[in-house]
Image (cartoon, grey):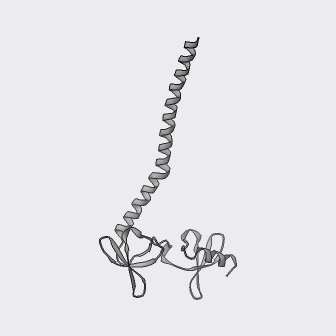
């Protein structure tokens, strides 16, 4: 009887060991498909963007500086960030500009599906919410102004 009990316990442990291995494999697959693979795709898109940049394109640096590409070297870009102000940045720190269509403006009113953007003094346009992305420097100020109805 004791021999049978020991045999049953050994058989149960063998099944549990296989189940543990299966669970580990499943967890690795989940991490791969939900974390690693999407990050690799994003890095590939950014690399493709950096290879396709031409003179005159609008970009933003990793430090949040918006500029227009003026010269392209092997490992660097020269960006014009203001009239006659050119900086040199590493290619690895340049990302696509996040505004849809390149229109910059301050949020003046938020409706259910639209924003009203002031793009110049007394020039306000209405755009769909899906085409507006915040500038990191203006997020807090714009939200405060929009909530106050300014």
Q: Position of residue 5 (x, y in %)?
A: 57, 16
Whether residue 77 is situated above or below residue 23 in the rendered picture: below
Q: Residue furthest top?
A: 1
Q: How many marks on residues?
A: 0
Q: Quadrant of the N terminus?
A: top right
Q: Position of residue 99 (x, y in %)?
A: 50, 73
Is 40 on the left or on the right of 76, as rendered?
right
Whether residue 22 is situated above or below residue 136 in the rendered picture: above
Q: Residue furthest front?
A: 2
Q: Quadrant of the C terminus?
A: bottom right
Q: Position of residue 139 (x, y in %)?
A: 59, 74
Q: Quadrant of residue 48?
A: bottom left
Is 108 on the left or on the right of 77, as rendered?
right
Residue plotted at (42% across, 57% down): 41
Q: Quadrant of residue 130?
A: bottom right
Q: In this orientation, which residue lies closer to the viewer: 84 or 115?
A: 84
Q: Position of residue 111 (x, y in %)?
A: 66, 73
Is 35 on the left or on the right of 73, as rendered?
right
Q: In this orientation, which residue lies closer to the viewer: 87 or 121?
A: 87
Q: Quadrant of residue 44?
A: bottom left
Residue plotted at (39% across, 88% down): 84
Whether residue 28 is situated above or below residue 82 in the rendered picture: above
Q: Residue furthest right?
A: 148
Whether residue 6 is situated above or below residue 80 in the rendered picture: above
């Amino acid at each position: 009887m004791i021999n049978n009990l020991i045999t049953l316990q050994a058989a149960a442990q063998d099944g549990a060991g296989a189940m543990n291995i299966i669970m580990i494999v499943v967890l690795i697959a989940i991490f791969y498909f939900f974390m690693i693979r999407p990050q690799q795709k994003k890095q590939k898109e950014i690399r493709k963007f950096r290879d396709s940049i031409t003179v005159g394109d609008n970009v933003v640096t990793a430090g949040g500086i918006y500029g227009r590409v003026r010269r392209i070297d092997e490992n660097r870009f020269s960006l014009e960030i203001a009239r006659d102000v050119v900086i040199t940045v590493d290619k690895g720190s340049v990302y696509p500009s996040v505004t849809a269509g390149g229109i910059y403006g301050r949020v003046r009113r938020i409706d259910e599906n639209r924003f009203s953007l002031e793009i110049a003094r007394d020039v306000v346009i209405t755009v769909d919410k899906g085409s507006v992305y915040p500038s990191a420097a203006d997020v807090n100020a714009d939200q405060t102004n929009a909530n106050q109805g300014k």
